[in-house]
Image (cartoon, rainbow, N blue to C red):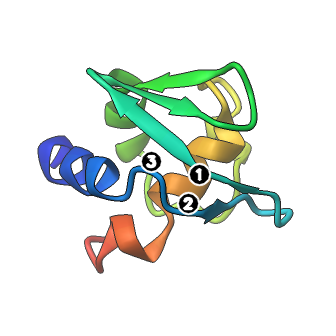
């Protein structure tokens, strides 16, 4: 499933996403990492792979041990990325 999700993440590069509290951000994809435009943080493809085991998510609580949990949540739970997969 990660390959399908990663393809969607790559296709949405540069699009606006919104965190739970409403902060908007964009990202770029370089290799196997997502680089966030509002912070110096990045999220690796392996983090997305691990987080996919927990979806669907209601909030960021389950992601607190991951890199950039609020961004990870915002990307994975966005309808452009989910596309009714969960």
Q: Do the residues labelled 1 and 3 touch (CB within 8 Å)?
A: no
Closer mark to the observer between disc 1 and disc 3: 1
Q: How crowded is mark 3: few (under 14 residues within 10 Å), some or many (20 or more)?
A: few
Q: Residues within 10 Å of mark 2 (few under 14, many from 20)?
A: some
Q: Name the residue under label 3.
A: 54
Q: Distance between the residues labelled 2 and 3?
A: 7 Å
- The answer to whether residue 16 is left or right of residue 39 is left
Residue 52 percent coordinates (x, y): 36, 45
Residue 67 percent coordinates (x, y): 61, 23
Q: Do the residues labelled 1 and 2 touch (CB within 8 Å)?
A: yes
Q: Name the residue under label 2.
A: 57
Residue at the (59%, 26%) spot, across then down = 66
Q: Which mark is residue 73?
A: 1
Q: Do the residues labelled 2 and 3 touch (CB within 8 Å)?
A: yes
Q: Distance between the residues labelled 1 and 3?
A: 11 Å
**Counting residues from the N terminus, which is met first, the one under dot 1 or under dot 2?**
2
Residue 66, compared with residue 86, is above or below; it is above
């Amino acid at each position: 499933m990660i390959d399908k999700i990663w393809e969607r993440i790559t296709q949405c590069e540069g699009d606006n996403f919104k965190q739970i509290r409403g902060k908007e951000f964009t990202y770029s994809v370089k290799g196997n990492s997502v680089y966030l435009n509002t912070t110096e943080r990045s999220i690796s493809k392996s983090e997305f792979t691990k987080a996919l085991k927990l979806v669907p998510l209601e909030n960021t609580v389950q992601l607190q041990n991951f890199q950039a949990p609020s961004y990870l949540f915002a990307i994975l739970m966005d309808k452009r990325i989910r596309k009714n997969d969960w």
